[in-house]
Image (tube, helix red, strand yellow):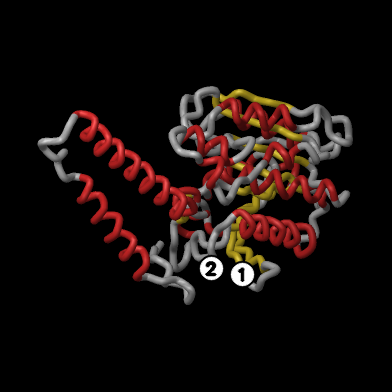
Amino acid sequence: MTSSQPAALPDDNPAAPRSIGRKIGSVLLGMCVPVPRGKTTRSKAWWIGRRIALLYLIILFIFAFFQRDLIYQPSRADAIDPRLSGLEPRRIEEVRVPTADGLQLNGWLVRAFPTPRDAQQNGSVHPAVIWFPGNAGHRGYRALELDQLSRLGADAYLVDYRGYGDNPGRPTEENLEADARAVWKFVTTSQHVQPSQVVLLGESLGGGVATRLASELSQADTPPGGLILCATYSGLADVAFYQYPWLPVKMILIDRFPSAEWIAHVTCPVLVLHCKADDTVPFESGKRLFDAAPAVSAGSVPKTFVVLPGARHIPLFAAGEPYREAVKEFLDRMRPASEPVRSAVAH
């Protein structure tokens, strides 16, 4: 796999960061000047206080100006070769999804892992899972998770957000949501999967993307078959405040992903999973998101909350069997009664 940095877009100003950096550097150097001698204690306290305030304002400016660089941390690549994924190349199908604004997004599809029962039942219907991942990396790092989903009996789709992997564009809240709509349209139209057979799976940052899409689809009376949320938040402002409690992040945050507002309109079954000691997205934020969801779906399926083991912000399936069992049970509900999911999880 070859990686490269994306070329600057036409409206970029490559000199701007250097200019800003020089100005910030000069101010910081100026602040390193020792406290002047011969001044009264009150004057010295005022002199130090002004510099502390100035330093705080500089940090606030840096956060406000570069906040999207903190939120979105894609890995870029000229191409992502399925042969380097760790899976048999024949198991990965490359998909290309057009967006409403003229971009093409690249992704992968890993079909449900074949079982003897599948081989005997021609035309067997598998649920489709559209996975919206976290804020870093690209699909080349996530093939094993796609494989695990497929072994739970689902056709697993992962289309990188714009600006991630080998995809053009820039990630923002609105752009990621446009990408999500494009992937939904691709799966339900080009791939001919019924909406009731599609599960939206949001992990970490992707939880906000999946929740908003599920909310929009529910309000349009075309809800997905289900919504699974792992290690995600009630709103991105909660996460920002948890990480930077000494900054007024709730005032200056641009991309907010207010998932607790959106999930109130979701009519499909909901499964939320979260580690009790998550060190990135606080457990309380995930619980608030769950509490904001309707108690039951339109089909009278109760919402479910699963506490995962572990003391960190874990990726999919790192929690092991509790995660797999919860997802398998959720997918089982979507299959005909005569055709339960048969897990083929590799150990």
* Kind of residue at badge 1: Gln
Identified at 45% across, 55% down, the residue is 65
First along the sequence among labels 1 and 2: 1
Circles 1 and 2: CB atoms closer than 8 Å: yes
Place of residue 236 in the rendered image (x, y in percent of width and height, measured from the top left)? 58, 41
* Kind of residue at badge 2: Pro
Place of residue 44 in the rendered image (x, y in percent of width and height, measured from the top left)? 21, 34
Place of residue 238 in the rendered image (x, y in percent of width and height, measured from the top left)? 57, 35
Q: Is residue 32 left or right of residue 330?
A: left
In the image, 243 versus 147, the foreground residue is 243
Count of marks overlaid on the render: 2
- Residue 199 visible in this rendered orientation of the protein: yes
Q: Image height check: is 4 above or below 87?
A: below
Q: On residue 326, which mark appears?
A: none
Residue that badge 1 annotates? 104
In the image, 113 versus 249, the foreground residue is 249
Q: On residue 168, which mark appears?
A: 2
